[in-house]
Every structure is written in structure tokens, then in C-alpha cells.
């Protein structure tokens, strides 16, 4: 009897792609031959890490539309918190003086 392989959901595939991109970025960062490859690896690591932080909370059974919706909401929340932190940090430091 031939086993039936189920079709993979979009979120499962993107999880795997993000892991591969993060591993590739580590390889590019650790190589010592080219500064340009290091820079590409560093930017790739930053982007894939942010997407992985958000996409780690997306259920693996989500389809493309659900995944993109949750990814957009999550990235908006993460970047809002970063922007608030950038603007609030100097004010909070001054409060402590």
C-alpha cells in the first residue's frame, strides 16, 4: 500500500524556509572572504529573525491569507514597540536623573 502524503500548508513551508535562511545567514556571517557577503548575511539575519519572531506564533496549519494577515499584525506590533522604545528611552533616562 502506498502511503498518502498530505499537502503541506503554507505556514509549514515558510517556517522551514525561515530556518534555512537563518542558517544561510550564519554561514555568510562566519565566512571571512568577503565583506559584502558578511553584510548580506547580517541583513538577512536581521530580517529573518524579525519574521521568525512573529511567524513563530502563526499556527502551522494556516493558509497563505491567514499567514500574511497574522504576519502583518505581528510585525506592526513589533515595530510599534521598537519605535516607542526609541522615543521613550531618553525620557525615561531623564526621569531617573
Image: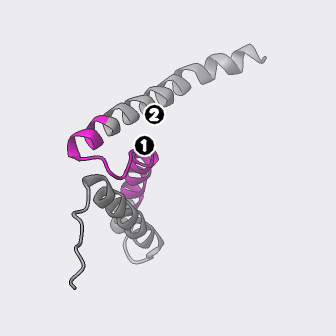
7 in the magenta segment: no
What residue is at 44 percent from the left and 49 percent from the top? 56
Q: Is residue 39 above or below residue 78?
A: below
Q: In what quadrant of the picture does the C terminus appear?
A: top right
Measuring from the top left, give residue 93's x and y in whole percent: 70, 21
Residue on which disc 2 sits: 78
Q: Earlier in the sequence, mark 1 or mark 2?
A: 1
Measuring from the top left, give residue 79's x and y in whole percent: 43, 32
Element under disc 1 = helix
Residue range in magenta is 41-69
Residue on which disc 1 sits: 54
* Occupied quadrant, residue 2: bottom left
- Report the side of 88 relative to 16 (left or right): right
What residue is at 21 percent from the left and 63 percent from the top? 7
In this rendered view, identify the residue nearer to me: 89 or 1. Answer: 1
Measuring from the top left, give residue 37's x and y in whole percent: 34, 68
Q: Is residue 8 above or below residue 54?
A: below
Q: In what quadrant of the picture does the N terminus appear?
A: bottom left
Query: Decide: marks 1, 2 in contact (CB < 8 A)?
Result: yes
In this rendered view, identify the residue nearer to me: 73 or 11. Answer: 11
Mark 2, other Cα within 10 Å: few <14 / some 14–19 / many ≥20: some
Mark 1, other Cα within 10 Å: few <14 / some 14–19 / many ≥20: some
Amino acid at each position: 500500500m502506498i502511503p498518502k502524503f498530505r499537502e503541506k500548508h503554507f505556514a509549514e513551508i515558510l517556517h522551514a524556509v525561515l530556518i534555512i535562511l537563518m542558517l544561510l545567514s550564519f554561514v555568510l556571517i562566519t565566512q571571512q572572504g568577503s565583506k559584502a557577503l558578511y553584510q548580506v548575511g547580517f541583513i538577512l539575519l536581521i530580517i529573518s529573525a524579525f519574521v521568525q519572531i512573529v511567524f513563530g506564533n502563526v499556527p502551522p496549519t494556516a493558509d497563505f491569507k491567514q499567514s500574511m494577515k497574522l504576519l502583518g499584525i505581528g510585525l506592526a506590533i513589533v515595530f510599534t514597540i521598537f519605535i516607542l522604545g526609541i522615543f521613550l528611552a531618553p525620557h525615561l533616562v531623564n526621569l531617573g536623573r
